[in-house]
Amino acid sequence: MQISTIQAIEILGTISFAISGSFAAIQRRLDPFGVLIIAFVTSIGGGTVRDLLLGDTPVKWMRDVNYCFLILATSLLTFFFRKHIKKFKVTLFVFDSLGLGLFTVLGIQKGIAYGLSPGICVALGTITGCFGGIIRDTLLNTIPSIFRQEVYATACILGGVLYFLLLHFDLKADVAKILVIGFIFALRAIAVKYKLSLPRFGY
């Protein structure tokens, strides 16, 4: 069976966020069931919110249980091989950033398929990329990255704008998707390495 670019992005994004959620749960010393739950909500959270906003129900993971099995397999493998990973923080960051880029593109594509304006498509991409992490961090009693100084949602928004700019200059859609995923990942990495952040307001 031939897999389309969007299907490949969805599969890779699901795996990336499942690993991200699993490592976040392992850091908090949750049991295997807890790891599975956190991996699951991280992987499907953003897409579920997006599909509910679009009225696309039942949501994707309910229509295709293969994604549930994929999350289950990924989370269990991550849990059982956790002792071979020395730098949990780095691994969590890598897969979280990769999932962010992949799911942002996926959300944008869903908006385009529904004939929505570019601005709304970018918003859907940001929701798809960010909300799984928001739910994960909330369940783990951590302030979500999107609400801190980290460049998180900003990376999704800038990536979405870049995607439509690339299409405007007649770049092939598949190439634009890959470039945007790389851009979001790189922007997150640069922001963390050089401690770049949005200004904080308050007293």
Image (cartoon, grey):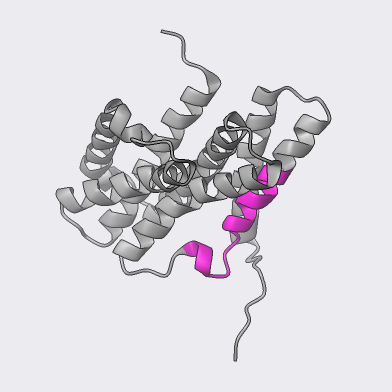
Q: How many marks?
A: 0
Q: Quadrant of residue 176?
A: top right
Residue lying farthest to the front in this orientation: 55
Q: Is residue 81 left or right of residue 199?
A: left
Q: Main secondary structure of the magenta part?
A: helix
Q: Quadrant of the C terminus?
A: bottom right
- Looking at the image, is 132 positioned above or below residue 8? below
Extreme-right residue of the structure = 169
Is residue 179 depicted above or below 39 in this figure? above
Expressed as whole percent of the image width and height from the top left, the position of residue 202 reads 60, 86
Can you say which quadrant of the picture contains the N terminus? Answer: top left
Q: Residue at x 62, y 78 (%)?
A: 200
Instruction: Indicate whether 154 appears above or below 10.
Output: below
Q: Is residue 167 left or right of residue 148?
A: right
Magenta region, residue range: 145-161
- Does any portion of residue 67 appear in the rendered image? no
Whether residue 138 appears in this view of the structure is yes
Q: Is residue 73 above or below residue 23?
A: above
Rendered location of residue 31, percent (x, y): 15, 54
Q: Residue at x 68, y 25 (%)?
A: 173
Position in image of residue 178 (x %, y %): 63, 30
* Horizontal side, residue 199 vs residue 8: left or right: right
